[in-house]
Image: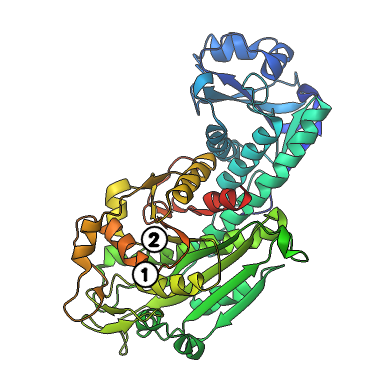
Amino acid sequence: MTEKLEISVAKGMLEKTPANILVVNLFEGVKIPAGATGAIDIALDGLISKFVIAKEGFEGKFGEMYVLPTYGKIAAEKVLVVGLGKNKDFTPNRLRELSAKIIKKCEKTGNAKKVISVLHGAGIGGYDPEISARMITEGTLIGAYSFDKYKTDKKAKKVSELVIVDMVEENCKLAKAGIKKGKIIASAMNFARDLSNEQPAYATPSKLAEIAQSLKDVEVKIFDKEEIEEMGMGAYLGVARGSSQPPKFIHIKYSGKGVQNQKAVQRKIALIGKGICFDSGGLDIKPPSSMLNMKDDMSGAAAILGVMSVLKDLKPNCEVHGIIAACENMPGSSAYKPGDILTAKNGKTIEVDNTDAEGRLTLADALCYACELGVDDVIDVATLTGACVVALGSTASAIMGNHQPTIDKLIKCANSGGEKLWQMPMFEEYKESLQSDIADMKNTGSRMGGAQIAGIFLQNFVKKVHWAHIDIAGTAFLDKPQNEFPKGATGAGVRTLINYLMS
């Protein structure tokens, strides 16, 4: 829960703009600064070139930083020199990551209420000022994020204002547009991160439903247990049985820019988020160490809610359905058991092989529901398998599906958003391990190829749509800091889905 950090752009001269910290940059190997950094070096009588570079050995490697007092030579109290790395390796995604590191450094550097910055990447880096400003904004708000809702001793955020300063009017105009879009995307990510970081006693199925109903400019329908039963969602209800928390099936609809003229809507897309608000494993209970962060098992749902929360601002030219089958997987007296037979919405029967493979059961009914909406694409996002974590770690999410162009497009959208997707195969041979002697299929198969087998299972509930499944089990929640993220929830999938909808 991040305190308000204002980000803006102003036309002016860096050396004459008052601030606690001024941020400038250097590419790796530069000995004599040019551009905005060069102007500040001159104003400081060569302190950057003669002292920071020549005497202190600053090389400009990516993420390298040096704080320099200005001794009253310019309006800012301190200068933070940051390394951009090699020019050939510098990308918008690197700028986003660097911006997160910069704001964290500023927070640790004494009294830093106001920070001003050059428009990184827009000079010698050659990037459009709008892109640069967007990446700076996204990275800054991602890096400034903290979840301290339950801390009694809250540490006040040191930085309350970041101003990008540039002398060129057109650059400022473009940067303003970039800041606006960066704020929207970071807002969606931090919305999702707040939900995934929340305690499970708060983020219940009923609370997710309440949050969905609070979203603006969308239609929301919440189905309760009786209505879910009427729809024939036996797989989903089987998982929900063991908890005292009632299940909530959530359907959010954004009608697109053409709400008054549906011919203007180019495509209809359903986004499904796995919404297991806490996963104990059910009767096949998890060991304590594996259960510790299972509040994050609704990170797919959090991502969908984050995306849906900003569609009113982004206004994509498509109809979007956000779908969440929210429940808990608990070992209560009514819990489903290994050996039970569940019947999904499409009539297919499932033998429960392991109650800890519950997410795919809830997704099965959600997929059936989505395919009945007349949409073109269905994309599900889920913390689904430990096998995905073993295969890809916390660096990349897995993707698979039934339509290669959709998969390719999502991978491209992930790359441009700073996320990584790696396609897993869905070979026919994987189907054999799901065979059941007494039902249409089992809910688990071999431990080998577990992520792909889960995908094969889900495909049984997809009909007449382009479908992609994204497994964020390794990327949704970090055990230690990585790139621009601290320990905790990352909002995985949000940037990918936003880019997909906006493309």
Residue 375 horizontal side relative to residue 23, left or right: left
Asked whether 73 or 257 is in front, the reply is 257
| Residue 354 on image: x %, y % | 24, 73
Q: Position of residue 433 (x, y in %)?
A: 19, 65
Which amino acid does the dot numbered 2 rest on? Thr
Position of 490 relative to 370 (above/below): above
Residue at the farthest left position: 437
Where 404 falls versus 42 (above or below)? Answer: below
* Above/below status of 452 relative to 16: below
Looking at the image, residue 70 sits to the left or right of residue 209; the answer is right
Element under label 2? loop
For mark 2, what is the residue?
Answer: 383
Q: Residue at x 34, y 79 (%)?
A: 330
Q: Position of residue 308 (x, y in %)?
A: 61, 62
Whether pointer 2 and pointer 1 mark residues with C-beta atoms closer than 8 Å, the reply is: yes
Q: Position of residue 20 (x, y in %)?
A: 70, 33
Residue 359: numbered disc: 1
